[in-house]
Amino acid sequence: MRTQQVAAATILGKGHTMTSHTARTGTERTNVQKAALAVGAVFLLVGILGFVPGITSNYDQLSFAGHDSDAMLMGVFQVSILHNVVHLLFGIGGIAMARTPGTAKNYLLWGGVVYLVLWIYGLLIDHDTEANFVPVNDADNWLHLVLGLGMVALALLLTRTADAGTRRPGHGDPHKNL
C-alpha cells in the first residue's frame, strides 16, 4: 500500500497527496466499512433468529405486527414478523452499504439516528395500544438507545482521522503556523 501512495503522490505532484482510502485496491476495508459490515451482519442474524422457534419464545404467538405479538426474541425482546423483516432489511442494507467508506459512514450515522428516534418513540407511546405497531417493549427501547448511540459513535469516531487526514499541513489548522 505504501508503494501505491508514493506512486499516487508522484503522479499528483509535490504537495498533493491522495487520501488513504482512494489509493486502496478494493480488497482492503477501512474500519468504518468493517464496522458497518459487522453491524449489518448482526442485524441480519437477529432478523433470522426472530423466526427460529426456541430462540424466539412464544413463537406460536408471533403475529405480523402490533402490540399483541407475544413472541420474545431470546425471551426478552418483543418481536413480530414486521420487526424481524425490518432487522433483515437493515442487515442487508448494512452489508451493501459497507462497500465504500462514505456509504458505510452514512449507514452507521443515519441508522443510528433512526434507532435514537425509535428509542424516543418507544418511550412516548403506550405499549398496549395500536401505536405500538412494531412492536417494542422496555428491553427493546433501551437496546435502541444503545444501538443508536453506538452506531453514531462508530460513524463519527472511525471517520474522524480519515477526515482530518485530508487537510494539508498549514491549511485549516490555526495552530500549525504559530
Image: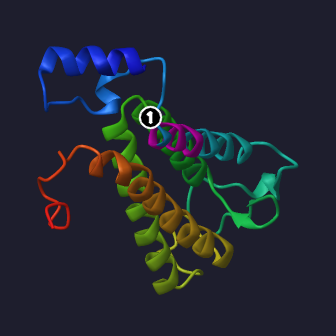
Q: Nearer the viewer, residue 164 or 139?
A: 164
Figure disc tally: 1
Q: Nearer the viewer, residue 11 or 113?
A: 11
Which residue ends up furthest to the front in the rendered image? Answer: 178
Stretch in magenta: 32-39
**Residue 25 in sight in this render:** no
Please determine whether, in this image, residue 175 is positioned above or below residue 169: below
**Amino acid of disc 1:** Ala
Kindly state the secondary structure of the residue where label 1 is placed.
Answer: loop
Tell me the residue at 27%/33% (across/down).
Answer: 19
Asked if residue 173 lies in the magenta stretch, the reply is: no
Q: Which residue is mark 1?
A: 98
Q: Tell me which secondary structure the magenta stretch mostly adopts.
A: helix
Question: Which of the image's four quarters has the N terminus?
Answer: top left
Q: Nearer the viewer, residue 67 or 150?
A: 150
Left or right of 60, for residue 155: left
Indicate the position of residue 79 as horizontal and vertical percent values. 66, 59
Tell me the residue at 61%/75% (across/down).
Answer: 142
Indicate the position of residue 158 as horizontal and vertical percent values. 44, 51
Tell me the residue at 23%/29% (across/down).
Answer: 18
Please determine whether, in this image, residue 96 is positioned above or below residue 26: below
Tell me the residue at 29%/46% (across/down).
Answer: 165
Q: Nearer the viewer, residue 12 or 99?
A: 12
Q: Quadrant of residue 97?
A: top left
Indicate the position of residue 5 as horizontal and vertical percent values. 32, 22
Question: Which of the image's four quarters has the C terminus?
Answer: bottom left
Indicate the position of residue 35 as horizontal and vertical percent values. 53, 44
Circle 1 packing at 10 Å, graded few (<14), some (14-19), many (20+), is: many
